[in-house]
Amino acid sequence: MREQALSGLKVLDLSRNIAGPYCTKMLADLGAEVIKIEQPGKGDPSRKEGPFPNDEPNHDASGLFGYLNNNKIGITLDLKSERGVEIIKTLVRDADVLVENFSPRVMPSLGLSYDVLKEINPNLVMTSISNFGQQGDYRDFKGTELITQAMSGFAYQIGDESREPLRAGGALRMMEYISGAFASMSTLAAIAGRRNGNKGKHVDVSITECAVLQTPYRTVQNSFPSSPSIFTKRYVTLPSIEKCKDGYIGISILTGKQWQDFCCMTEMYDWVEDPRFMELFNRIKHRDEFRGRVDKWLMEHTKEEIFKLGVEWRVPITAIPTFGEMLDFPQYKEREFFVSVNHPIMGEVVQPGAPYRLSETPWEIRKPAPLLGEDNAYLFGEILGFTEEEIQLLDREGVI
């Protein structure tokens, strides 16, 4: 097996759902050895989420779990059992990283706090991902995607100003993926710090604070000491998603030059230097007149026609593809972005690849996501040296 960027890095993955598993996925896809630890009999809750082949629920055939857990070694272990905690401590001795995304009280209650684990392995990097971080009045509160988007101010900036704020991303749990990426980056930063003679670190990642980082523009605007109220309007009129003759088109006009080119493209020459529409805030102020004319033009043209005009006039425009259309999008196909993974239950499935390229140590899918407890015999037998009888006893006692 060829070397990858993170070959040799050993990671214990106690996390579940999306944020933690996405963090460890990013490490595993670059070559780290990730041991995915799940609850016996139940597994990661994401195993209960689809899509499933033929819409038949199967904890070994979840499309979400499959995407998040490629390249991982999968075992089951009861962390609430004394024996399970002992096994975790044994695994920690040789680990570089431990990732968890429980509520902040859980790991200490199990006897697996960072203070305990660093005594076993002073070089361990422990990454904890939680809704609100390890400190503060909110640290033990439950959270969901809607709550983190709302508390971060992310939702407030989205939607028509005459209506309620909107959650972004539909069913997609955007903030969990974003926080997983931040967790991966900060974990690698802690690993890099060890090379300078530093010991391990406890990395504390707040999903809500990761969400706040997606709104720096509004944060800065509203921190100005004078007239912050002028920045409260939501941006809904170019840049925006617009309906056209046969679907939807995205139009992003951010500069005066782009506005002038847009006016020439649409043959609205009398608006080229009209102060009511040249600036974003003024387009919102004169929205009714703007919408009446632009909507009429859009409904007279198809997605393809508008896209070609955008290319010709150098106006930032894109058609809004369906998921089916996206899989055949020429740019993605040329870069081989989507990859096929051969799963023992689901068969061949298509998943997003990596948005980056490493020339010498490439990203790759080495193995599909594990079935529940698939690697118990390998890890407990070959790695930890348990006999077959000991493994069977652990199974009967519900430890694995």
Image: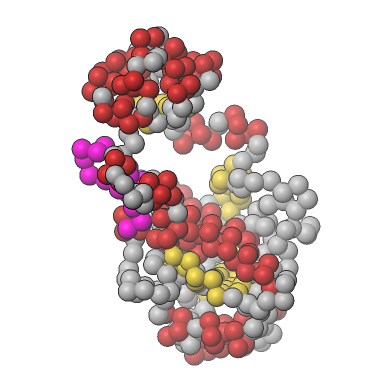
Residue 259 image position (x, y, % from top left)? 43, 21
Residue 248 within the segment the image draws in magenta: no
Residue placed farthest to the bottom in the image? Answer: 82
- Looking at the magenta stretch, what is its main secondary structure? loop
The answer to whether residue 58 of the structure is visible from this angle is no
Residue 163 within the segment the image draws in magenta: yes
Q: What stretch is highlighted in magenta?
A: 151-168
Q: In which quarter of the image is residue 206?
A: bottom left
Residue drawn at point x = 45 percent, y = 13 percent? 265
Residue 56 horizontal side relative to residue 382, left or right: left
User: What's the colour scheme?
Assistant: secondary structure
Q: Quadrant of residue 379?
A: bottom right
Residue drawn at point x = 48 percent, y = 87 percent? 111
Residue drawn at point x = 48 percent, y = 59 percent? 179
Residue placed farthest to the left in the image? Answer: 162
Residue 137 horizontal side relative to residue 312, left or right: left
